[in-house]
Amino acid sequence: MNDFLRKLGWFAQRRRKEAELREELEFHLAEEAEERATNGLAEEDARLAARRDLGSVALIAEDTRSTWGWIWIERVGQDVRYAARMMRRKPGFALAAILTLMLGIGGNTAMFALMNALLMRSLPVERPDQLVRLMEPVHPDGTPGRDDFTLVTHDSLQRQTRALSGVLAASVAGLRPLEIEDQGERRQVFLQFVSNNYFDILGVQAFRGRFFSQPSAGGAREPIAVISHDYWRRRYTSDPLALGARVRLRSGHEFTIAGIAPPGFGGLELDVPADIWVPVEQVVAGDDPDRFRDRWMRIVGRLQPGATIGQAQAEAVAVVGRPVVLELAANGYSGLRRRLIQPLLLIALVFGLVLLITCANLANLMLAATTSRERELGVRTAVGASRPRIIRQLMTESLVLAMAGGLLAIFAAWWITDALLAFLPPENAPALANLRFTLEPRALAFVAALSCFTCLVFGFFPALHATRRTGAPQFRAGAGTGERNRRWLSRGLLVSQVVMCTALLALAGVMLRSLQNLRSQDAGYREEGLLVAEVQPPFEYPEDRRDQLIEELRVRAAALPGVAIASFSHVGQMTGSTSQVRVGFPGHAKPAQDEPTVAEHRISPGFLRAMGTPFVAGRDFAPTDDERSMLVAIVNESFVRRFLQGRNPLGAQFFRDGPRAGELMEVVGVVRDSKWSNLREEPRTMYYRPYRQMGGTPVVRFALRTSGDPNAVAPLLIQAGQGVDRRMAIRNVVPFREIVNRTLVIERLVGYVSAAFAALALLTAAVGLYGVLAYSVVRRRREIGVRIAIGAQPGAVEWMIVRESLVLLACGVALGIPASLMITRLVSSLLFGLSPGDPGTIIAALSALTLATIAAAYVPARRAASIDPIFALRED
Amino acid sequence: MVSRGRSRVDLLQGTLDLLILRTLLFGPTHGHAIAKHIQRTSEEMLQVETGSLYPALHRLEAQGWIAASWELSEKGKRAKYYKLSAAGKKHLTAEQTRWDKFSRAMGLVLKPVDQEP
């Protein structure tokens, strides 16, 4: 170690040492010359004689320098310079290598970073490994258990637990912000109701001010709130006067901001970092019967030192009185984690394969390149370079490539993470801060490790191979005995690339075709030229006033230029929500309870025509179908099939359960089935009724059929809304196509990413094949020259080269098809309208591969055919 | 390059080191003077190659047996003066003992007792 430090120290003073050495030798020369001069020589002659006697100063300097001990560093420098020189000679290869490595390593790093953020990263709290969360057990059918509970569950656990040092409750965070008044100003915030002991159990210390349980300086039981550091920065521009500000909830509860959470702390929910925390006890007091109602709380405990999770769980089961489980909660809560884990693993697999293809490809090209440098390596061996020295030098070349690729991969990872996150729907925007790529030590270590790994894979083995034979054979022209060996390795690498490419192409193929199948099916609506928007009248108005404003906006929207039909429904199609009711018919006492439910949609006149759902019989609702007239309904074909088989549906009557049960509705129209929640659902039994006959919804969704580009109408609609009432909230104004896309996040994510990277893999493999063939044609010039000289036709020579690559392709495909079947089975749950091993897709993948192979082989084949035998034979 | 350098130094290594250390026992001096001193005291029998002298000096310095400093020579020029360190003195004693044993052994073999007159 000491020795190493000394060397390092010397290395730092290297310049000075060099100058001193020069001066020392200079002095020696001067002394020598002076001595000769005193012996009677002329000054000039004396200098020359001294010079002659000394010999080569450079050589002495070199020998002396070698005793300094940093020679190895110099050699690394030499190797790097040499590698850079080789790369300048083949800039195309170096560029392609660095770019493919950048994407390969970058993709894997992006996946690692995302997985790390979703799964591994711990909450910024004290000893996160001691935290446990309360869950219901996984259902027998595999659906995960619920993780929301009533407040009273928290109360009893907190009171009775012994294995846990404390139990906290925190409200389940909604994806939508809440509106509050902060200093009299309306703000949209993410607010969490938490138990008093929330911050104490998490072990989070206040950045400024105080938290709930600490004794207040002011009056007793004054309701206080805590804001996040981020909200403090955004809302109060980090002004200390924020402490003492007052916030008011819509329910009328008021709180004084008394504390600021430390930077980076956003609560337990990864998807929705909280802005404000308020004590739930202020809203639902400790003895309020409401504590028994509604499961809206997450429950998290901290294990006592020495207690096991098993003890705590047994205790929790006894307290709660039904099966519950405790899980480690160090990584917090995340709905995205549940949704994204499978697609992210798939994408990780894709990126892993792409990186392997890149490595195989580079290994092959390095192999070909070192073989073409056989003679150079032979000369180096002959003049005394040892095998480790040559391997080291070849490795330096690949290391320089890998490091350059790795460095750029950091930028690629950042970019790829952003591109992947762009697939997430806008309601997940709050989670992005937690998921974006950050330069944290783990990610950097991953990049470094991956770069070294790739370097080892594509650099070490070719280097080992290239230096296996030493001595004379390299000087012989043409193929030696090791040639066969090398070609087998090279072929093996090409075949493995084909196998992986086949699998990737098949995966991308089935995903894209599923997307296409989902999109091209008859969904019962027309998504082009359709603009939708969520409309929310001011909450403070009474119900009928709100309905009036909605109707007013509808009328104004219908008059906008470019709008053909303006309509709305009480829940949005393709948002995933529906109202479920049970229906009954006159003559039966009650709706049958064991029957599946029916979806009820309350719509304005024109909604079905705006959505493009065709009528089969009867009429649309009219403005006259209101409170005072007869209750009417429009049913879909599934409704008719299920309830009204063999009858004329028009004029049939039915009723529903729930509020205003028993009022008879008369069917006035029948429409085609349409997908309501998502594109995968089976046709559902549904009926529609006029909004005017059952209104009163806080938010409705507008659907505008436009004659031109729906985007052009969006600003006009927002303007019209402002015209109706300044406080009218109009959100999510987007073409309906966008809404449909949001139901296909996972399919689109996996489909597009795998397609893009399959194309990249195919291109990489094709370029690699081209490179290997081009080298082999150069190496086989003489052989091909002889063939042509003795009468081979150009066509036959071309075919010889192409045939070789087609044989490799066939081998790769033979292994690739089973691999494709395996990989496509992994995504079977994401497929639609085709089976995992869809023959059409696999044939398409094979055609793409064949085309790419022929394209890659054609140029070298042409070059081979145009070899002039005279020149080729004369060369050696 | 390495191998060539080593072979030239190897030939003289033990002996040249010993000669340098012994010379420095008289006091600090520079490379040229060391070479001249060895030449003179060996009655011009031993020619110290400059190409061996400086690598040897730097190696001895790296091993900590001699220390170097820049001083003015008697003619007023800057020169690198080498000085024997404590460790170097110890090493010199050990080496000298070894050399004495070696030369006695050589002497015994080359001039056996029974051939003496």
Image (cartoon, coloured by chain):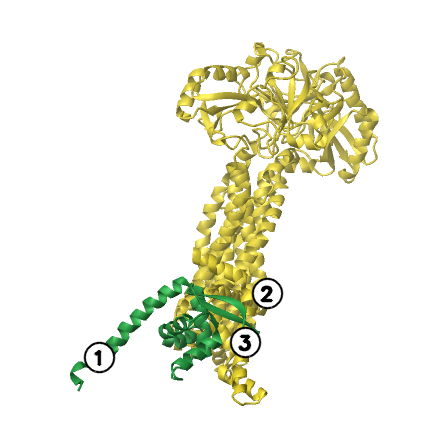
For residue A697, above or below residue A403: above
- Label 2 CA crowd tier, 10 Å (few <14, some 14–19, many 20+): few
Q: Position of residue B51 (x, y in %)?
A: 46, 77
Residue A328 can be seen in this image: yes
Q: Position of residue A75 (x, y in %)?
A: 49, 66
Q: Position of residue A235 (x, y in %)?
A: 71, 30
The residue that appears at 28% across and 76% down in the rendered structure is B103
Q: Which residue is mark 1?
A: B109
Q: Which chain is green?
A: B
Please identify the quarter of the rendering in which residue B42 is found: bottom left
Residue A401, numbered label: none
Q: Which residue is mark 2?
A: A92
Give the chain of mark 2. Answer: A
Asked if badges 2 and 3 are on one and the same chain, I answer yes
Residue A27, numbered label: 3
Give the chain of mark 1. Answer: B
Q: Colour of chain A?
A: yellow
In the image, taking residue A324 as reference, residue B91 lies left or right, namely left
The residue that appears at 55% across and 81% down in the rendered structure is A868
Q: Nearer the viewer, residue A51 or A756?
A: A51
For residue A862, above or below residue B113: above
Q: Nearer the viewer, residue B10 or B20?
A: B20
Task: Name the mark nearer the viewer: 2 or 3.
Answer: 3
Q: What separation in Å lies between label 2 and label 3 (alpha carbons)? A: 51 Å
